Amino acid sequence: MNFSPPPATIEELQHRIDLIAGLTLGDLAGELNVVVPENLQVEKGWPGQLLEAYLGASAGNLPEPDFQLLGVELKTLPINRDGKPLETTFVSVAPLTQSSPITWRESSIYKKLRHVLWVPIIAERDIPVPLRQIATPFLWQMDAQHESLLKNDWEELMELITFGHHDKISALHGEALQLRPKAADSSVRTQAFNQQGQPIQAPPKGFYLRTSFTKQILTKQFQL
DNA sequence: GCGTGATCATTG
DNA sequence: CAATGATCACGC
């Protein structure tokens, strides 16, 4: 995709997002001269990549916030017509080989979620992809309550990982943050440690925000 | 293979 | 019908 130049300031970013509220994915794709996929079965990440290109977010595949200059992470959020999140939100892969413990504020989760540009998209599956409409994007900063919630979940999950119990972690752990498979398929393996601290091969996992958490963010923002 | 962007689709 | 586990594409 053809990328726009990155915004230099928060104000410039705010101005850009004010202009896309109410537009459809087809509108944005048309401006960028890109073809809209029939459905997202084959190109699941397409909405996110479209918005990245349109808004000039380009951290590439670096484990860094999308707008590096501004320290802002871009997240599209599929919602239904009532404004309720339809999917969990992927944040980052989990470090299964973390030997020396890192602190919450050093974590990629904190760095990415500290400041987020949320772009809600009305994305019920019966709406054709090009007609899916961008609701009201907004800049959001993690507050103390969000932080303690996420920090608690993160510390619990990281402790399980550190002690080699990552194989016993399911999506059921965590109130706001959960750990789920993150791979091309279930046969993929990556380096990890077992309970004895010996290196083993294990399925890669990623951190995801539950819909209950993103729903609260939307509720606070829009007083839904 | 890993990390980016996520949604799909089966199941309880 | 929500949620968990599985999956798809791309850059390097």
Image: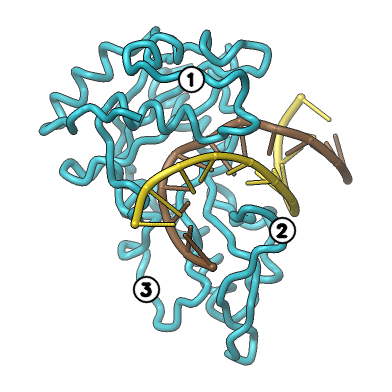
Chain colours: A cyan, B brown, C yellow
Looking at the rendering, which quadrant does residue A199 occupy? bottom right
Q: SS at mark 3?
A: loop
**Tag on residue A160?**
none
CA neighbours of label 1 inside 10 A, class few (<14), some (14 to 19), many (20+): many
**Tag on residue A121?**
1
Left or right: residue A44 versus residue A150 is: right
Q: Are marks 3 and 2 in contact (CB under 8 Å)?
A: no
Q: SS at mark 1?
A: strand
Residue at 27% x, 30% y: name it. Answer: A3
* Same chain, labels 3 and 2: yes
Amino acid, disc 3: Ile
| Residue under pointer 3 | A102
Amino acid, disc 1: Ile
Left or right: residue A165 versus residue A220 is: right
Q: Give the CA separation, mark 3 to mark 1.
A: 34 Å
Q: Give the CA separation, mark 3 to mark 2.
A: 28 Å
Task: Please name which of the two marks, 3 or 1, marks the residue nearer to the observer.
Answer: 1
* Same chain, labels 3 and 1: yes
Indicate the chain on which mark 1 is placed: A
Residue at 62% x, 33% y: name it. Answer: A42
CA neighbours of label 2 inside 10 A, class few (<14), some (14 to 19), many (20+): few
Quarter of the image with the N terminus of chain A is top left
**Tag on residue A186?**
2
Amino acid, disc 2: Ser
Task: Please name which of the two marks, 3 or 2, marks the residue nearer to the observer.
Answer: 2
Q: Give the CA separation, mark 2 to mark 1.
A: 29 Å
